[in-house]
Image (cartoon, coloured by chain):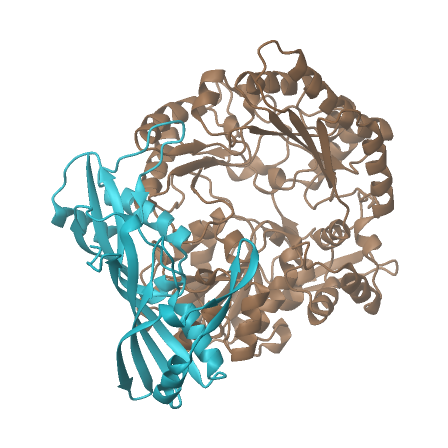
Amino acid sequence: MKDYRIEFAKTGSLRYISHLDLNRCMIRAIRRSGLPAWYTEGFHPHLYLMFPLALSLGAESLCECMDVRLTEEVPEDEILTRLNAALPEGLRALRVGTPGREAVEIGSAVYEITLTGQDVRVRWEAFLAQESIPIEKKTKKGMKTVDIRPQITQEAVEETPDGLTLTLRLPAGNEGNLNASVVTDAFTAFTEGAVQCRRICRTKIFCLDGKVFF
Amino acid sequence: MLKDKIEAHLLEVQRPSRYSGGEVGQVVKDRDKVDVRFAFCFPDIYDVGMSHLGMKILYSLINSRENYWCERVFAPWPDYEAVMRREGIPLYGLESRDPIRAFDFIGFTLQYEMSFTAILNMLDLAGVPIRQSERGEAIAPIVCAGGPCACNAEPLCDFFDLFILGEGEEVNLELMDLYRTMRDAGATRSAFLREAAKIPGVYVPSLYDVTYHEDGTIEAVTPRDGAPAVVTKRVMTDMDKSFYPDSVVVPFIEIVHDRVSVEVLRGCIRGCRFCQAGSLYRPFREKSPETICAQGRALCESTGYDELSLSSLSTSDHSRIREVLDDLLCYTAERHINLSLPSLRVDNFSKDVLEKVTTIRKSGLTFAPEAGTQRLRDVINKNVTEEELMRTCTIAFEGGYTQVKLYFMMGLPTETDEDIEGIADLAQKVVNLFYDMPGRAKGKLQVSISTATFVPKPFTAFEFEPQVEKDEIIRRQQVLRRAIKSKKIKASMHVSDISQMEAALARGDRRLGAVLYDVWAAGGKLESWDEFFDAQRWYAAFEKNGLDPAFYANRTRPYDEVMPWDHLDYMVSKRFLIRENELAHQGVTTPSCREHCAGCGANKVLGRPCFPKEGDA
C-alpha cells in the first residue's frame, strides 16, 4: 500500500464542475486508468480519495491536489501517464509525489484574477483603500457581517489592454477561508457593474507556516 | 463566438455543467469533415435525458459513421432559459456548441406525453419555425421524432416532418443516407419527405388526410402521394447482431439513473393489459449471455462506472439469467461494481442470488401489485399473487429490510370500492407478516403505498377504456384512507389534472396540435414537472379550440371506432387487443407468452414462434 499526492490543473469548461462532481469524476478516471486503487474495507467499500482543499465552482486552478492510495507501488511517471490518458479535457495531472504536509496545515492560496472594464486600476485602488469591506456572510446562525479587507493581500497587479490582472493571496483551509469570488463580487458591486470578472485561477497553495503546501 | 457568450453567463445558473458539455465519452468531430449533422434532442432537462438508454444507443450508432455527427441537446431549466432568451443564445449542441437550427436533422425522442410542450419550446429556442408548414422548401432542418409516444404522435403532427416507428438502429441510418443523397442533388423538403415515406417505419404525417364524423370521432385517414396506407414499426430481429455502444457519455453531475446499462432483452412475455411498453416492444427477443457480459464489461471499462444495470421490462424473464449473473458477478465483485436489476421479479430468485445483486438500495424494497384484489389483478392480467408478495417480503425481512414500497394504480377498469379496500388489506398483511416473524430485523417497519391514476394507452387491451374522472379518484382515495388502520402504513396519493391531460394526449388526434401550441404560447414548457404544470392553461387551450379533454380521456370507445393511430402498425393486432379486452371484463387471465402463445401477431416479423417448442423446426 502506498499513498500518492497528485497535483492537477482544472481549467476551461471544467471550472463549471462542483467539488462533489470533481470527486466522482476523479474516481471514475482512476478506475478507467487501471491503476491499482485501494478500496476501504467494510460493507460499502469505496475508492479512497482525499482532496486537501476544495475549489469553488467557477474557479480554475493550476495547483489542485488529491491524495490517492494504491495497493502497490507504481512509478510516479506511470501514474501520471495512465491518469492523464483517462482524464477529460480540462483536467490534467501535473506532478506526483508523496503526501507531505497535511490538509489542516493549509493557510492561504494565491489567485490570479482577470478583470475587464473601465478604469479598472483606479477603481481597484479605491476599493482596496477602503478602511473596511463589509460582506454579508451566511452562517449556521443566520446572516453575519464580516470585514474582508484585512484578509486581502495584494501580491501583484498588472495592467492589460482591457483591464487588470491581480494576484491576490487569500486565507484558505480550516482556519478560515475566503473565496476569491467573494472579493470579485464585492468589487464588481463596488463599481456598480463597470468592471467584470473574467477569470479566477488558483495558482499556489501555502501552509500556515508560509511554506508551499506541495 | 457562441461559446464565449455561453461561458460568460454559465455561473449565473444552477448546475452549469448541464450546459457546457465536455464529458468523458462525448464524440467531437471536425465540423468541416462531416456530411450530415444530427441534433438528438431530449425534451426534458439534462439530468433526466442523460439517463435514457435509447439516446445512448442511437448517439453512438450515428457517430459510428465517420461522416455523420450526432450531438446531444436537452431542455434548459428555467434559470438558463431566461439567460438564453435574454442574451440571444440559441439552442445548441453540447458537443460543438453550434446552434442546432443549422443542423440537418433535429430529432426528438418521445418518452412521455407531458414532454410535448417542451418540444415546442425547444424548437422556439432553436430559432426553428414551430409549425412544419412554416418551414418552407429548404430541406434542412428535418424535424423528426421516435420513441414510444410515436405510436400515437397525432397531437404532434403540426410540428414534425416525420416520425420513426419502432426501433431505430437501422432506419435512422437509412433515413440519413437518403437525406444525404437527396440534399446533394438539390431536393426540396417535400420531395425528400415523399421519398422518406417509402422507407419502412417512416411516417410522414403531412401525407395523410384525416376526416372526422360530426360527433368528433375519426371517419377516415387517407394517404396521399404514394404514402403507404399503413406504416409498420421497425424491429431488430437479432439482438446479438443489433448495434450496442461500447462507450457512453459519462456525466459530471449526478443524473437520475447514474449507471451503465446493458439491455438484456426486448419485449415482455407478461401481457399486463394496462402496459403499453409490454405491447409496443414485442416480440420478445433476448441477447445471449455472452453478448450481455461482453457489453457490460466493455461499458464498465470505458466509463469507470461502479454500477452496472441489466435493464429490460422484466430482466428475470431472460431464459438464461442465472448464467448471465454467475458470469457477471465474477467480474463485478472483483472490480467493486454493483450489479443492479431494476426490474427484477424477486419471486424467481433464491436468497443467495438476491444477496449478491443490488436489487434495491439497502433497507428499501419495491413491489408493484398494481391492484388490491386478486379479482382485479386478474382483470389487468398482472399475474402476481398474494402468496408471491408474502414470500418476497419474507425473504426481504429475513435479509434485514424494514421498508416496503407497494405501487398501485387507481381507476383501473371494473374497479370497485372492494378493490380499493384490498390495497389497505394487502399492506396490512405485510405489516402482520413482519410482526409475526420471530427473527425479524430490528428497526422501524414502514409499508408505503403509492397510487397513481390509471391512464389508458394506445396499443393496449385498455385502449377502449374510459379514464376515471378526477372527482371519483378523490372519492376512492378517501375510501383507501379510511381503510388503512395501521400507523405503519403510509399512503402517498396525490391527484392532479396532469393524468387527464396525459390521457387526452395519449389517445388524442391531430386537432390537439392547436391545443399544444396554445398551452406553449401561454407559457407551458416543462409541463411534466408538477411544479410547472398549470391545469388552467390546458383547460383554457382546450376551450379556445372548441375541444373537450373528456372526449379523449374519459369516453368509452367502441371496438369499431377508427382510432387516431389505426394507420400505424405495431405488430400487435387489433383483434388481439379486443380479445384481451373481452377477457379482462370476464376476469380471465392470459398466460405468459412462454407458457402459451396468445397470438398477438408480433412474431410474424421473426418468421417463427417467439418460443419454439421442442420438435419445432
What is the letter of the cyan chain?
A
Residue B378 as seen in the image, left or right of residue A94: right
Is A170 above or below relative to B340?
A: below
Q: Nearer the viewer, residue B506 or B98?
A: B98
Q: Position of residue B387 (x, y in %)?
A: 66, 16
Q: Nearer the viewer, residue B59 or B406?
A: B406
Q: Position of residue B330 (x, y in %)?
A: 33, 25
Q: Quadrant of residue B66?
A: bottom left
- Who's the residue at 30% across and 61% down the image? A108
Residue B227 as seen in the image, left or right of residue B96: right
Q: Position of residue A33 (x, y in %)?
A: 24, 45
Residue B134 as seen in the image, left or right of residue A115: right
Residue B137 in sight: no
- Who's the residue at 77% across and 46% down the image? B495
User: Which quadrant holds the N terminus of chain B?
Assistant: bottom left
Is B451 above or below relative to B50?
A: above
Q: Nearer the viewer, residue B530 or B303?
A: B530
Q: Position of residue B504 (x, y in %)?
A: 76, 53
Residue B215 in sight: yes
What is the letter of the brown chain?
B
